[in-house]
């Protein structure tokens, strides 16, 4: 478990044969949040318990669930949370989603906002966490830092929808952007100023619309 920001920890085994997604634990006085993926993080269970356990397990999209994610939820006796759109797809594959949410902008807690972000998948969520005066955007697999740039993976019919989603993000202030994707290279948690934020969103939108 590696601290990457105040109260934010990365849970990822570095010595593995193939790239694995990035899982994050947000430590909060009112209950810790786990931004989960399909990775097996059972080796971190004891450390998570020492930090106070988990009050919610949050999923960005359907790509973040595996049998290991189900084991995680059962171990901490916390339901998996995602949009109803993604839950429907996952339940059809045999995965239990105990806390499916409406696909709308909403507050999960006082310090955590849910942002619908369709494009990468139809029902993807991003999460905006207020942490000690900083706004941290957990963007899942929607935008991925690769080397010095940002990449996305989206089917051609969904490119316009993703561009619309990213355009809406321009109205949301955030200080850090965090990606869960296994394709990330370098730091998965990047600090962005207002100019950097607008530049990376504008570049992605322009590229999507050209396609």
Image (tube, rainbow, N blue to C red):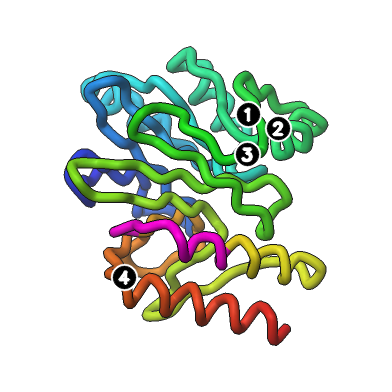
State which tag comes first along the sequence, 4 or 3. Answer: 3
Along the viewing direction, whichever of 209 and 138 lies nearer the viewer: 209
For label 4, the residue is 194
Secondary structure under badge 3?
loop
Secondary structure under badge 1?
strand
Secondary structure under badge 2?
helix
State which tag comes first along the sequence, 1 or 2. Answer: 2
The residue sitting at the front extreme is: 171
Magenta range is 166-176
Residue 101 is left or right of residue 132, and the answer is: right
Q: CA distance from mark 1 to mark 4?
A: 30 Å
Q: CA distance from mark 1 to mark 2?
A: 5 Å
Q: Are marks 2 and 3 in contact (CB under 8 Å)?
A: no
Q: Is residue 187 above or below residue 203?
A: above
Q: Is residue 102 above or below residue 5?
A: above
Residue 68 is left or right of residue 175, and the answer is: right
Quadrant location of the N terminus in the rendered image: top left
Residue pictured at 72% horizontal, 70% vertical: 159
């Amino acid at each position: 478990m590696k601290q990457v920001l105040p109260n934010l920890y990365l849970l990822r085994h570095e010595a593995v044969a193939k790239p694995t997604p990035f899982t994050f634990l947000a430590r909060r006085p009112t209950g810790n949040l786990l931004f989960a993926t399909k990775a097996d993080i059972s080796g971190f269970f004891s450390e998570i318990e020492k930090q106070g356990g988990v009050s919610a397990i949050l999923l960005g999209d359907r790509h973040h669930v595996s049998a290991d994610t189900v084991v995680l939820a059962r171990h901490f006796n916390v339901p998996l949370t995602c949009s109803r759109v993604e839950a429907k797809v996952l339940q059809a594959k045999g995965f239990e989603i105990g806390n499916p949410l409406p696909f709308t902008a909403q507050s999960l807690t006082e310090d955590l906002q849910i942002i619908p972000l369709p494009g990468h998948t139809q029902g993807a969520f991003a999460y905006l966490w207020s942490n000690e005066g900083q706004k941290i955007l957990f963007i899942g697999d929607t935008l991925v830092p690769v080397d010095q740039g940002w990449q996305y993976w989206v089917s051609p019919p969904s490119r316009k929808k993703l561009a619309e989603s990213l355009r809406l993000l321009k109205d949301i202030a955030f200080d850090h952007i965090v990606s869960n994707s296994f394709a990330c290279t370098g730091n998965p948690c990047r600090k962005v100023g207002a100019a950097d934020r607008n530049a990376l969103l504008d570049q992605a939108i322009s590229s999507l619309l050209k396609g």
